[in-house]
Amino acid sequence: MTYTDNGDGSFTFTKTLGEEPKESKPDREKDMTMMKGMVGDVTWDYEINFPMNILDIQSNHGKVDFKGKKVTWSVPLAEFVGGTSTLTVKLGTVGRMESSPKRQTVILKNGKRIYGEVVNMTKTHCLVIVEKKRERIERDNIKSIEF
């Protein structure tokens, strides 16, 4: 695994998929469209564990997710057929990027909306974390939950 030293205590890792076309032909566009149609639902999944904290992640295509020091990058093949897709991860020994918690909207029967992370549900109660506070809501008062 190759890293670029940024000189400020951080490092950058870059992974590029695909390659730019070497020549441009009028028929090439038609060929690329046909090829993209053939690989429409196929994704290329890349998972990597880094030895340092993740400070920033950027990708020009696909979906990027991370947990701790592990990054998962999922790119539809059609995104880089006839071109490139690049993942750039900035790493460091201090600080780290915080993953955003999964947020749901709890809609109560009285119309009130509660935005937070649903962490537990029982037959009688629902536990939601809202801005570092736990709210216990009776299930009878809940109209719906949007995930």
Image (tube, rainbow, N blue to C red):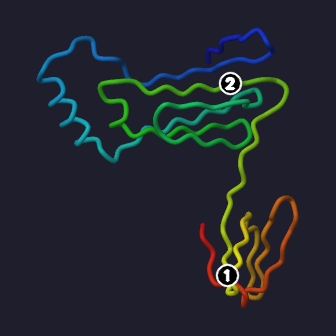
Q: On the image, which quarter does residue 114 sit in?
A: bottom right
Label 1 crowd bin: few (<14), some (14–19), many (20+), radius 10 Å: few
Identify residue for label 1. Answer: 111
Q: Which residue corresponds to the image point at 62% horizontal and 20% vertical from the top-left?
A: 13
Relative height, residue 109 to residue 53 (above, below): below
Q: Which one is in front, 97 or 111?
A: 111
Tell me which amino acid carries mark 2.
Lys
- Looking at the image, residue 81 sits to the left or right of residue 29; the answer is right
Location of residue 76 (image quadrant): top left
* Residue 79 position in % (x across, y down): 37, 35
Q: In the image, what residue type sits under mark 1?
A: Gly
Q: Residue furthest front?
A: 111
- Categorize mark 2 by other alpha carbons within 10 Å: few (<14), some (14-19), many (20+): many
**Eyeballing the image, is 28 above or below 134?**
above
Residue corresponding to mark 2: 90
N-terminal of the two: label 1 or label 2? 2
Residue extending farthest bottom = 140
Which mark is in front, 1 or 2?
A: 1
| Above/below status of 135 relative to 14 | below
Q: Whole-percent x and y of residue 59?
A: 53, 31
Residue drawn at (60%, 70%) of the image: 146
Give residue 58's mark. Answer: none
Q: Is residue 125 left or right of residue 33?
A: right
Depth check: give the residue in front, 77 or 101. 101
Looking at the rendered image, the quarter that the N terminus falls into is top right
Disc 1 element: loop
Q: Nearer the viewer, residue 56 or 123?
A: 56
Q: Position of residue 141 (x, y in %)?
A: 73, 88
Cα distance between the residues tagged 1 and 2: 43 Å
Q: Give the residue at x 86% y 59%.
A: 132
Query: What is the quadrant of residue 66 in the picture?
Result: top right
Q: Split into 4 quadrants, where in the image is the C terminus?
A: bottom right
